[in-house]
Image: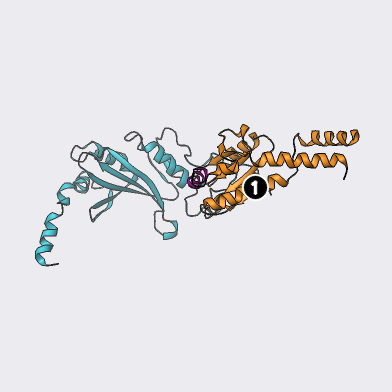
Amino acid sequence: MSPEQQNNAQAQLPQVDGERPALGRLHQQFPEAILASHSYRGDDTISVAGDSLLPIMQFLRETPELSFETLMDLTAVDYLKMGKSPRFEVVYHLYSLTHNHRLRVKVPLPEDLPEVDSLTSLWKIADWYEREVWDMFGIKFRGHPDLRRLLMYEEFEGHPLRKDYPKSRRQPIVAQRT
Amino acid sequence: MGVGEFITSKLDHAVGWARKYSIFQYPFITACCGMEYMGVACSHYDIDRFGAGFPRFTPRQSDVLFVVGTISHKMAPVLKTIYEQMCEPKWVVAFGVCTCTGGFYDNYSTVQGIDTVIPVDLYIPGCPPRPESVLDGLMLLQEKIQNQKQEILPKAKWRETQSSVSRLL
């Protein structure tokens, strides 16, 4: 590609930095709560302390220039076998319909107290997402209206997506024929 | 051979013939194998040629339980109830590798073969099985139905009737 063509290609790229003010605003507003942040090829990621999750999320949702109306995904990661500390991380994906921008928010959680504030007061959809994460990873959500298992049955013991759950430990609820 | 035995064996044959060509199936479809089941049921392969073209969506009216697709441990009690609700005589077909052995779902949630929950008469392996192998399986099932002892009455009642028929002749 000639230098001229390269310049043209670059000129066609949208000016993304100007359109994604989320990271800057968060650093400004919550300097002590932010543990880490990075921006890679248009994906903004921010890691925050669990205590300040609720005010940060409220800020992201209600500030007009950010207005993240949609909680697109809420999941968790177990870093047991990757030797990372703390062990768990809850991951939130936000999307703004107004501004067409996205943000990933992560909250690291320790093994001995995997608890974080529930976001059901901000996004209704968080209800089932949080129940699924509780079911699969055993992470508790403080203030959740009805934190029951979502996918597994009530008799099931343990949390199957934790890395220390034996992959083939089955818990049948009907009598097994031999 | 006594006259009584001759009559019952001919009756068995006739009833078997009737039963094998009027299979009312209950399709218990939970996963992707269902598409292949529909393929068998539609005009290209036309399961109706074998007298099995009439799915009943209630276990009370069906003869063969087609278990099509992965069964999870959460689903197993439902499958067992459906099986128990079916009237005698009844047969069970495990359609696809997930129902036969659990397939590649060697994990915490999947039943490792439905024969750990209910008795199975016929296994059709494949992921999913081709319609040809389903039809082959269906013909094997017909053979099984034809050749088995036909119980017209419940087992205890049947024995009683048989002995009284022999006594009369």
Rendered-image quadrant of the N terminus of chain B: top right
Q: Residue at x 67, y 34 (%)?
A: B87
Would you say A129 lies left or right of B86 here?
left
Letter of the chain shown cyan in the rendering = A
Looking at the image, which is closer to me, A46 or B35? B35
| Residue A163 on image: x %, y % | 47, 54
Would you say B29 lies left or right of A114 here?
right
Range shown magenta: B32-44
Is residue B43 something that shows in the picture? yes
| Residue B17 on image: x %, y % | 69, 41
The rendered magenta stretch, by its main secondary structure, is classed as helix
Rendered-image quadrant of the C terminus of chain B: top right
Q: Residue at x 87, y 33 (%)?
A: B164
Numbered disc 1: secondary structure: helix
Looking at the image, which is closer to me, A127 or B35? B35
Does the segment drawn in magenta span residue B41? yes
In the displayed structure, B120 sits above or below B163; it is: below
Looking at the image, which is closer to me, A88 or B126? B126
| Residue A113 on image: x %, y % | 43, 46
> In the rendered image, which residue does mark 1 sit on?
B141
